[in-house]
Amino acid sequence: MAETAPATTAESIAPPNPDAAISVRDLHKWFGSHHVLKGMNFDIPKGEITVFIGPSGTGKSVLMKTMVGLLRPSRGEVWYGNTNIHKLRGKQLYELRATFGKLFQDAALFDSLSVYENVAFPLHRHTDYPEEKIRDIVAEKLRQVGLPGVEHKMPGELSGGMRKRVGLARAIALDPEIVFFDEPNSGLDPVMSAAIDELILETKELTGATFVVISHDIEGTFKIADNIGMLYMGELIQFGTQEEIRSADNPILRQFFERRTEGPIAIA
């Protein structure tokens, strides 16, 4: 039998923060009887890097998919300024989501398209720019991610790190105000993982965009994050600046950061 969300009232939900890039209020998500997100509340500051961390299976990817409108919440709200994304339908939702950049875990490149065609894809889909301008934008974005002159290559010719860089070039092709990263270091060796962290920092400084990152990489998180949210068992157990999270004495945080097998986080 499916679990039913408990009743709530508009008065019990705090209003969105107009100064935040994203405001999340009382966010819940059920899949049948499985309660994945359990009443999350937070504000993501504009122009900063916010990283959500936590053990595998704790709801990080579901949180991201709900924030970008790929999943609808069972209860709660996700606000972009004065817009509740989950009140939008059809063209309005499509237009808002087109303003986000997204770098997926495996870069999600189209294997049948060249690097140029992959990076140009959002430009062809969402603008009426002439091809000459699109070529210039693609070349500039590839230069920004350290891959000048690879437009002719196919994804199958690229290393894992290069694929991530091309994915990032595509994610920033439309100069989005917010870019989402799903496990950007997944599948990379330590050296390339560090290179991706540096690229994220460089790109953030270059664009001034708001970056939202899902990760379980502790070292990379401390390298790039302005703000950190820790998820465990579907709950946001701590959210704050990196300094606040580093100094917190929450035993779940401490076990996760110190990579200890003993503690409240159960080892499956």
Image (tube, rainbow, N blue to C red):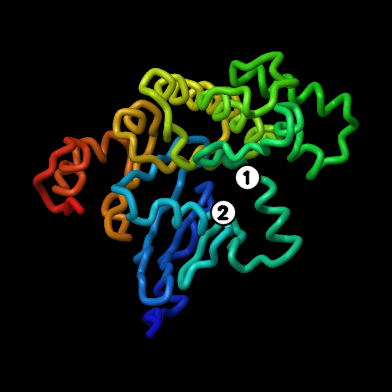
Identify the element where label 1 is drawn: strand
Q: How many marks?
A: 2
Q: Is residue 49 left or right of residue 140?
A: left
User: Which of these two is toward me, 255 or 160?
Assistant: 160
Residue found at x 35% / y 33%: 221
Q: Position of residue 220 (x, y in %)?
A: 36, 29
Residue at image mark 1 = 100
User: Which of these two is toward me, 189 or 55?
Assistant: 189
Residue found at x 46% / y 47%: 44
Quadrant in which the N terminus appears: bottom left
Find out whether the residues at labels 2 and 1 contact each other: C-beta distance under 8 Å: yes
User: Which of these two is toward me, 133 or 41?
Assistant: 133
Q: CA distance from mark 2 to mark 1?
A: 8 Å
Identify the element where label 2 is drawn: loop
Indicate the quadrant where residue 159 lies.
top right
Give the mark nearer the N terminus: 2 vs 1.
2
Q: Position of residue 113 (x, y in %)?
A: 74, 34
Q: Position of residue 155 (x, y in %)?
A: 64, 29
Q: Position of residue 116 (x, y in %)?
A: 75, 27
Residue found at x 55% / y 25%: 203
How crowded pointer 1 is (Cα within 10 Å; few <14, some 14-19, many 20+) is rated as: some
Residue found at x 44% / y 63%: 25
Q: Amino acid at mark 2?
A: Val
Residue at image mark 2 = 68
